[in-house]
Image (cartoon, helix red, strand yellow):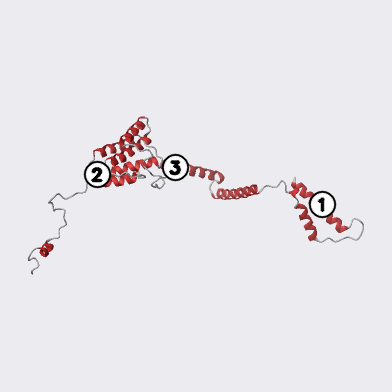
Amino acid sequence: MSGDMATAALHTVARLRTAAATGDDGGVPVTTPRTPAREAAERELSKREYHQDDPGLLQRLLDWLWDHISSLLGSAAQATPGGWVGLAVLAVVVLLLVVALRMRLGKFRPETTSDSGSLFGNRLRSAAEHRSAAEAHAAADRWSEALQERMRAIVRSLEERALLDRRPGRTADEAASEAGRTLPDHADALRSAARSFDEVTYGERPADAAAYSAVRDIDGALQRAVPRLPETPAPGDTSLLVKHGDRGSDATTPGGGGR
């Protein structure tokens, strides 16, 4: 519609120019400069009724974006063996690789902080309560929840035995590292349990019966573990004292320095 109106306006301006140039009243032909005629045509075409059906700014932006995307896809299709078919096959292969990688790795684990990586929730439970909850989840085949509760039972048990101090915001990795210094024979097992907890909690990798059984066995072994305390010398035992040799005795015994 707007195109017809614009065409009609151009025809009207052209007729005016012809009439002005030829002089239809029979008088002397009048010569109209080109510039005023062009300005008259521009004023006519700038009226609102000629542009009421023009696309809006958003539509023009989308059209421009689509034109560029189409141009890029066309260039890619020309460079890909098989044209558009080859490009489609390549896109499907890339999509399948991304899906396979996502299923294999699970959610990428973010860096844990003392808040988001906290091992315990707001409710304070005993080690026995965490073990009971773990067994309840295991009986219902909720292995991920069972593994989490069993790891909480491990850390809470170490706190109850005063092998770890109670500290809010502690992560599983921190607990395993600290407890490993007191229980060095079980340091690797503690790290393994903490890693399983992190994979389930932050990596969203579901646990199975075998993973839960491994953490449960670690819990049982730790309950029987004897901590290695720092060695202290017995009364009268000088074996742990630093020996300085005969050089010190020469300086302290009578006559030692009379050379």
In this view, 251 is above or below 84: below
Is 62 or 24 nearer to us in this picture? Answer: 62
Query: Which of pointers 3 and 2 lies earlier in the amino acid sequence?
Result: 3
Q: Pointer 3: residues within 10 angstroms few (<14), some, or many (20+)?
A: few
Query: Which of pointers 2 and 1 lies earlier in the amino acid sequence?
Result: 1
Is 255 or 86 nearer to us in this picture? Answer: 255
**Residue 187 located left or right of residue 107:** left
Query: Which amino acid type is marked by label 1?
Result: Thr
Q: Secondary structure at mark 1?
A: helix
Q: Position of residue 246 (x, y in %)?
A: 11, 62
Query: Which amino acid type is marked by label 3?
Result: Arg
Residue at the spot 63% in from the left edge and 48% down from the top edge = 58
- Residue annotated with mark 3: 102
Residue at the spot 79% in from the left edge and 49% down from the top edge = 8
Q: Position of residue 224 (x, y in %)?
A: 24, 38
Query: Which amino acid type is marked by label 2?
Result: Asp
Q: Tell me, yes or no, whether the two marked residues, 1 and 3, touch with CB atoms within 8 Å.
A: no
Q: Position of residue 165 (x, y in %)?
A: 30, 45
Residue 185 numbered tag: 2
Distance of mark 2 from mark 1, alpha carbons?
100 Å
Distance of mark 3 from mark 2, alpha carbons?
36 Å
